[in-house]
Image (cartoon, rainbow, N blue to C red):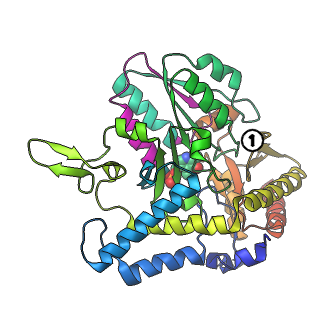
Amino acid sequence: MFNVDKIRQDFPILQRQVNGKPLIYLDNAATSQTPQQVIDVIVDYYSHYNSNIHRGVHTLSQEATDKYEAARNTIQKHFNAKHAYEIILTAGTTHGINLIASGFSSLLKKDDEILVSALEHHSNIVPWQMLCEKTGATLKVIPMNMDGELVMSVYDKLLSKNTKLVFVNHISNALGTINPIEEIISKAHEVGAAVLVDGAQACPHLKPDMQALDVDFYVASAHKMCGPTGVGMLYGKEAWLKKLPPYQGGGEMIAEVSFEKTTYADLPHKFEAGTPNICGGIAFGAAVDYMNAIGFEAIAKYEHELLDYATAELLKIEGLKIFGTAKEKTSVISFNLEGIHPYDVGTLLDKMGIAVRTGHHCAQPIMNFFNIPGTVRASFAFYNTKAEVDTLVSGVKKAKMMLS
Ligand SMILES: *Cc1c(COP(=O)(O)O)cnc(C)c1O
């Protein structure tokens, strides 16, 4: 049974006060909070077996290596990858995307085309622009409609035999739209293009199945799903990971080194140069276990109730407009009050202990589309409550009164 009061006890930070008020944390799309179960794993690592992995014969190194590889297996099972070595542990989503972009720079040529969606995070736009500059390939954009949904009929027209790569996020961090990635992937495969899905925003809310999706690459960050910052995962199909050149040279990623020739290590180590975030990787595994113990179906159902409730209550406020009204969306609400700058609303809400994000959410093209400087974004996690939604709504009303 899903019991939010019990779940909240797992998160020590939810007990704190901000500006003399109980913290109401509604910035989960930027980073999620960390349960005691994951904090304990971090403390245990540094208290008992902190050491470098994969190279020592000593006990601590062996323990750290075993736990790190066990975390990789946990992540593999969670994402239903066929092999553990198809899971590359990265520094996060941005790192994973750059790794793929860099790998494709040796595979693309002039006249090749890359499609990205209009809903992308900056981390999913800039690396492709850099890649196009380097290779002479062309970047094309799948547009969106006023609800913040991708226009699939235009996607169909953009696809051609020149399309080599399609990059799309699973869920938009700015608007909460859930993109139809199954359809995007199968249509891309019909023309022989590979697909990379940015799952940073999806993984806190659902459990994507790599084999069922038949996706070529999928990236995520631990810190958006109850884990620590600076660690994430890149899933790649074995054939692709074998084809792509290594991203960085260094220790861990080699088989043999001489000045004449260096041969690379097998997967996944080929893409894991240097000492990784060992503690972070182990804690990422613990975060995945934590979320699975609650259950993604229960999480999705509860968050949807919060989303529907918050949407209905916020829309009762006169002059409040929500951006991102897709039929399929997660618990992200981007909104503005007529004639009031989002930054001012966010500042006043912080005075009341309510943490929301304001600004362009690393997605300036979306803001340009709606012709606004930014929005106030409240994003809900499974540990938020209806009572917190009520406080948010009365806070927004108060802010509106003070600012108009
Ligand atoms: C947060 C986020 C990113 C960037 O993740 P990092 O952990 O900062 O690398 C990329 N894409 C989306 C959709 C995100 O929400």
**Image: magenta residue range:** 94-122
Judged from the image, the secondary structure of the residue bearing numbered disc 1 is loop
**Residue 6 vertical placement versus 166 (above, below):** below
Q: Does 376 appear above or below 5? A: above
Residue at the image point whose x is 35% and y is 31% from the top? 105
Mark yes or no: residue 19 visible.
no
Q: 140 or 105, which lies in front?
A: 105
Look at 74% across and 67% down and name the residue there.
384
Q: Residue at x 46, y 68 (%)?
A: 282
Residue situated furthest bottom in the rendering:
47
Residue matched to label 1 = 324
In front: 233, or 306?
Answer: 233
Q: Position of residue 134 (x, y in %)?
A: 34, 27
Q: Name the one closer to the observer, 231 or 83.
A: 83
Mark 1 crowdedness (10 Å alpha carbons): few <14, some 14-19, many ≥20: many
Ligand 1 closer than 8 Å to label 1 CB: no
Query: Was residue 106 drawn as part of the magenta stretch in this picture?
Result: yes
Image position of 278 (left or right of 208): left
Side (left or right) of 185 relative to 316:
left
Q: Position of residue 266 (x, y in %)?
A: 31, 49
Where does residue 176 sit, x and y in percent of width and height? 70, 46
Picture coordinates of residue 102, whole percent (x, y): 36, 37
Whether residue 36 is in magenta: the answer is no
Residue found 82% across the figure and 63% down from its top = 398
Is residue 394 visible in the rendered image? The answer is yes
* Callout 1 amino acid: Gly
- Against 297, is 63 above or below? below
